[in-house]
Image (cartoon, helix red, strand yellow):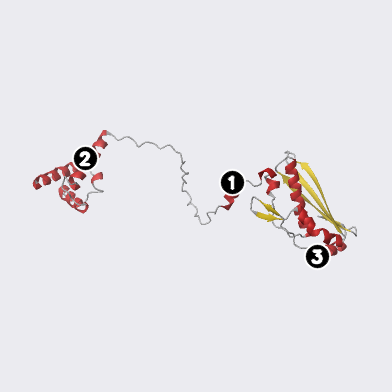
């Protein structure tokens, strides 16, 4: 901030002006956030008379500069002066992301409004600064960009961190190619058929018709041991053949 050696008269006048100034009205709408804000014109309507009555004036001088990398920025100097000759001033830098006449104009208007409110103490709600940042007038009324919708999404604040050393599996692609199951060998195919035949022989209506809880005791008696592992699927072929032979003999005895 820059100022004259003394700002006593200016500070007194500014205090009186702020005491007489009313709150700014939100006279425009932001289509992106569905909210209202105060325009630059309304800011002037709010402070013009109180400034006039207290001998104050405001001057804003914009300039555009180009950086070494070719980026444009608005430099806005705002000067608040008093009839006594006292003054204070400050400079605000505003980047221009949309480098065309519309983008420059939006950035200047945006800078003027905020610099003015900050200098004079005008209460103003948040505004449509998106016009100076990303969007032109032709974008208004359209759906918000994806980034806005993402910001509204809840964060996983309660998510526990993965323990160190634990490899994180990447998410599976939605359209990942499903690989066909590996082909079984002739021995595996033969064994699966034997398991199925044994099961039907023990529990099927054409077989012994044992209940599920009766199968294990029968198998234990046939094999002569208590440990039968995980059942028929894990048994060796020799054990399955013994069970089939015993079940067939029992079935013959019932005929």
Residue 194 - label: 2
Residue 18 position in % (x across, y down): 80, 63
Residue 31 position in % (x across, y down): 65, 50
Distance of mark 2 from mark 1, alpha carbons?
59 Å
Question: What residue does disc 1 label?
Answer: 146
Which residue is at 9% across, 47% downward? 254
Which is more foreground, mark 3 or mark 1? 3
Which is more foreground, mark 2 or mark 3? 3
Question: What residue does disc 3 label?
Answer: 20
Residue 20 visible within the image: yes
Which of the two labelled residues, at mark 2 and mark 1, occupies the earlier sequence position?
Answer: 1
Residue 97 position in % (x across, y down): 70, 43
Front residue of 167/90: it is 90
Residue 236 visible within the image: no
Question: In this rendering, would 30 be left or right of 48?
Answer: left
For mark 2, does the 10 Å Cα neighbourhood hold few (<14), some (14 to 19), or many (20 or more) residues?
A: some
Which residue is at 21% across, 53% downward? 213
Which of the two labelled residues, at mark 3 and mark 1, occupies the earlier sequence position?
Answer: 3
Front residue of 171/122: it is 122
Distance of mark 3 from mark 1, alpha carbons?
44 Å
Which secondary structure lies at badge 3? Answer: helix
Which secondary structure lies at badge 1? Answer: helix
For mark 3, does the 10 Å Cα neighbourhood hold few (<14), some (14 to 19), or many (20 or more) residues?
A: some
Which residue is at 75% across, 43% downward? 104
Distance of mark 2 from mark 3, alpha carbons?
98 Å
Residue extending farthest to the right is: 84
Which of the two labelled residues, at mark 2 and mark 3, occupies the earlier sequence position?
Answer: 3
Which secondary structure lies at badge 2? Answer: helix
Which residue is at 26% across, 33% downward? 186
Asked if marks 3 and 1 touch (Cβ < 8 Å), the reply is: no
Question: In this rendering, would 145 be left or right of 21?
Answer: left
For mark 1, does the 10 Å Cα neighbourhood hold few (<14), some (14 to 19), or many (20 or more) residues?
A: few
């Amino acid at each position: 901030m820059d100022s004259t050696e003394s700002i006593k008269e200016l500070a007194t006048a500014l205090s009186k002006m702020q005491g007489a100034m009313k709150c700014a009205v939100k006279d425009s709408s932001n289509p992106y956030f569905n909210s209202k804000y105060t325009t630059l014109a309304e800011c002037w309507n709010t402070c013009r008379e109180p400034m006039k009555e207290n001998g104050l004036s405001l001057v804003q001088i914009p300039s555009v500069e180009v950086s070494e990398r070719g980026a444009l920025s608005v430099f806005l100097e705002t000067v608040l002066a008093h009839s006594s000759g006292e003054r204070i001033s400050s400079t605000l830098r505003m980047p221009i992301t949309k480098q065309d006449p519309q983008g420059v104009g939006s950035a200047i208007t945006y800078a003027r409004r905020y610099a003015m409110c900050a200098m004079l103490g005008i209460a103003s709600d948040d505004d449509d600064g998106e016009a100076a940042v990303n969007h032109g007038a032709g974008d208004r009324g359209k759906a918000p960009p994806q980034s806005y919708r993402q910001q509204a999404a809840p964060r996983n604040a309660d998510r526990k961190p993965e323990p160190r050393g634990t490899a994180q599996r990447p998410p599976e692609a939605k359209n990942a190619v499903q690989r066909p199951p590996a082909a079984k060998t002739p021995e595996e195919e033969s064994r699966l058929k034997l398991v199925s035949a044994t099961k039907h022989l023990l529990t099927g209506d054409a077989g012994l018709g044992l209940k599920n809880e009766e199968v294990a005791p029968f198998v234990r008696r046939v094999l002569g041991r208590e440990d039968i592992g995980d059942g028929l699927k894990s048994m060796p072929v020799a054990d399955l053949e013994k069970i089939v032979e015993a079940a067939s003999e029992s079935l013959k005895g019932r005929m």
